[in-house]
Image (cartoon, grey):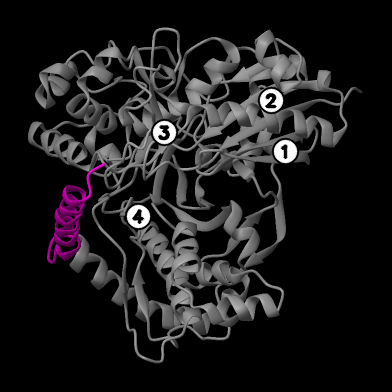
Amino acid sequence: MTPRYTIGIDFGTESGRAVLVDLSDGRELAEYVTVYPHQVIDQELPGSGVRLGPDWALQHPGDYVEVLKNSVPEVIKTSGIDPRDVIGLGVDFTACTMLPIDKEGEPLCFRPEFKGHPHSWVKLWKHHAAQKEANLITERALQRGEHFLPRYGGRISSEWMVAKVWQILNEAPDIYKSSDRFVEATDWIVCKMTGKMVRNSCTAGYKAMWNKNEGYPSDEFFKSLDPRLQDLTDTKLRGEIVPPGTPVGGLTKEMAEMMGLKPGIAVAAGNVDAHAAVPAVGVVTPGKMVMVMGTSICHMVLGTEEKWVEGMCGGVEDGIIPGYWGYEAGQSAVGDIFAWFVERGVPTYVKTAADKEGLEIHSWLEKEASKYQPGETGLLALDWWNGNRSILVDADLTGLLIGYTLRTKPEEVYRALLESTAFGTRKIIESFREKGVEIHGLVACGGLPQKNQLLMQIYADVTRLEIKIADSTYTPASGAAMFGAVAAGSAAGGYDTIVEAAKNMARLRTKTYQPIPEHVAIYEKLFREYCRLHDYFGRGTNDVMKHLKEIKEEGRELTYAKNPL
């Protein structure tokens, strides 16, 4: 029997990777990572010197094409397979990562007249400069009693589509007018491969307030926000919406030549990275939460009926697995917090000690932090270094670390930061349980579970749940490959449903993490203190974090005034 393969392409925050997967058992035969040449653009536009404001985060759409150009041919070369045996492609992306395009489907930032304008570029998921618009959307929906709002935990995020679109309209009406459509990057890259522009129901449902039975919110609602937005969904957000796994079209000849594949193979509709990971770890029924752990965390849960959970990022019917409600929550920074501390917060002697032992700084800090028992550091942190995604949905919140003394060591701070992210996950779990969403186990995937055993044990102890680990470094890409197999269908050697694909292709490690009872007892006490800090600084009792950001902006404006471009 001729072997059959699919390729999953995962577009992350800093890089994109392709994974070649054997359809018979889900084995990953080759993988290749392409680092984005322009990385995250958060200071100034490339080549222009145009400065960006606070909370901006952009990307260069050309970097995504580089992933197709470099990573796909490399996995074919490394594996040694016949490229004619690749029957399908699937992609997943960070979200909401959006961009304005013209009538030809090209990004506005590619046009000379717009390349120096920040609003013509890709707005990355962690672009939080539309917080004002997000707040107004939430306020108006509450005033009008809009019934879509509870599906999103009662608050609309600055990370999402409509807030970002409205920011463009408010700050750059010329860009808004010149845009034919605003699209998710995952839909744009699929269009690039197939020549067909469709929207996927995953990003539309979770990031653009779309519902499969009701569609988008009404024109009247958008008019109440801003009369200029009245026809938004019929114009700038128009387009067919299809479920993930739907075959959008065949790979074009031009793209096939660039990627080293045969023309015409099936390309699946786009997906969100976290959502694609759920079937890749074998979760196709309720009861388990999937944690996609990297720079941030997305928490994915399945349910049998609609529930309104505080602070969830969305509840979408058929949003993850057909036949179930899919719920999403998340933390805006996890790995990013640890990376920040390693890059900005450790003294020279730590690097010297790590180098002497032949370890990376992360590994050295983990080794030293693991020598402490829960509570022994005397430190406690809030995990809001990049705002709070769930359950407060507030990008203006910031990080907090208390308990410092003159004897505090870097490894103690590192452990406290690890613990803070575990407490944030526990808070999300409790929010789901309070509304009747069953969670009795955790499955973790992404880069962090592969590298940091201490982190995973802390999560098990804090959440009081067993944690299983994906047998894949790039689980979202493997999930995307599964959806590529569904797009191809059984007639071509793939699968007809994502449930069938998961049954045959999902892979987990044998090692699991179990809660340690004596650790659990101490973390219960620390979690109570975390909750007090969470509510005190996050629910309006003390808005010092927001006041500090306002004062910071005043200082920034003064600096710009004294140092003009």
Question: Which residue has dot 3 on it?
Answer: 97
Quarter of the view holding residue 482:
top right
> Element at badge 1?
helix
Name the amino acid type tagged 3.
Thr
Please state, as top left, top right, bottom left or bottom right, where the C terminus lies in the image. top left
Where residue 457 appears, as percent x and y from the top left, is 57, 71
Question: Which residue: 32% across, 42% down?
Answer: 56
Disc 1 or 4, which lies upstream in sequence?
Answer: 4
Given residues 259 and 500, the one toward you in this image is 259
How far apart are the two marked residues, 2 and 3, measured between alpha carbons?
Answer: 25 Å
Residue 236 screen position, x and y as percent:
30, 15
Secondary structure type for disc 2: helix
The kind of residue on which mark 1 rests is: Met
Q: Which residue is mark 1?
A: 505
Q: Is residue 320 above or below residue 519?
A: above
Q: Nearer the viewer, mark 1 or mark 3?
A: 3
Which residue corresponds to mark 4? Answer: 386
Q: Nearer the viewer, mark 4 or mark 2?
A: 4
Label 4 and label 2: CA atoms lie apart by 36 Å
